[in-house]
Amino acid sequence: MFFCTYAQTAYNLVSTPTGLQFTTPSALGTKGADSVDYNDFKGSPFWNNEWQPAVFLLSNGGGVKVDQVRLNLFTNDVYYITAAGQEMVAESENIKRVYFLYKQDSSKVVGVFERFIDIKSRYNTNQAPFCQILNEGAVKLVKLISVVMDKKMDLSVGKTQYIFNQETDYFLLRHDIFYPLKKLNKENVLAFVIPDAETENWLAAHKSKLKSENDVLAFLGYYNKGK
């Protein structure tokens, strides 16, 4: 199962859309959440265990704002709590994007997820995953986390232990085409973002090897300004 995500160490570089016509949460669907107790598992299937406010951009162009939302990375589901306190699962086909907001300041975005049919999880190729868009501009860095449940015998207690493990994949999105990056480094990124002399000078001046998310995002922030 899968979702695309990133650690919540900074505000996201994508803003919520303006001019949305908001509707009621019922537009997300009326599917009840599963009753699995994930406390029995090692690790967590959620992007963030805490409930967060979020804005949904619907497939029909409308919007929904909900105060309590979280992502189940294992099931590829978006959970939300209704005003009546009922836990529900949004119908994925109804959602275009999910903008997670900072609890203390809802004007700040901490994570943006969009469903892409052109990307497949490592573990499930039958569904289109929600992938995290880490920046805006002509060239975007997209992150996918594929989550799998493993099991092993815990000899200390004499029973099987279930464990959530995850793998991260990155893509560059340009002109609606995804370019997979085997890993983040200068060779892989520049294979799809062909540098000119000014770009090479910028990389040299910043001593950037493009080996981390922050490095790539800083580079794309510069690169996209000229596009």
Image: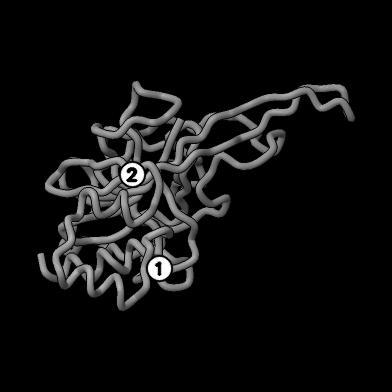
Residue drawn at x 32%, y 69% as measured from the top left: 218
Q: Label 2: state its secondary structure.
A: strand
Residue drawn at x 64%, y 36% as measured from the top left: 38
Q: Is residue 199 left or right of residue 27?
A: left
**Residue 211: x %, y % from top left:** 42, 58
Q: Is residue 51 visible?
A: yes
Pick whichever, 64 or 213, lies toward us.
213
CB contact under 8 Å: marks 1 and 2: no
Pick whichever, 44 or 50, lies toward us.
44
Q: Name which quarter of the figure residue 128 lies in.
A: top left
Q: Label 1 vs label 2: CA separation?
A: 23 Å
Quadrant in the picture for the C terminus: bottom left
Above or below 27: residue 36: above
Q: Which sits earlier in the primary sequence, circle 1 or circle 2?
A: 1
**Residue 162: x %, y % from top left:** 68, 28
Q: Is residue 69 left or right of residue 93?
A: right
**Residue 102: x %, y % from top left:** 44, 66
What's under tag 2, amino acid-wise? Leu
Tell which residue pokes out farthest to the bottom in this image: 205
Residue drawn at x 36%, y 68% as measured from the top left: 208
Pick whichever, 70 or 159, lies toward us.
159
- Kindly identify which residue carries mark 2: 181
What's under tag 1, amino acid-wise? Tyr
Callout 2: few (<14), some (14-19), or many (20+) C-alpha neighbours within 10 Å? some
Q: Label 1: state its secondary structure.
A: loop
Q: Is residue 23 visible?
A: no
Callout 1: few (<14), some (14-19), or many (20+) C-alpha neighbours within 10 Å? some
Pick whichever, 116 or 218, lies toward us.
218
Residue drawn at x 36%, y 23% as measured from the top left: 125
Q: Name which quarter of the figure residue 44 lies in.
A: top right
Tag on residue 117?
none
Tag on residue 11?
1
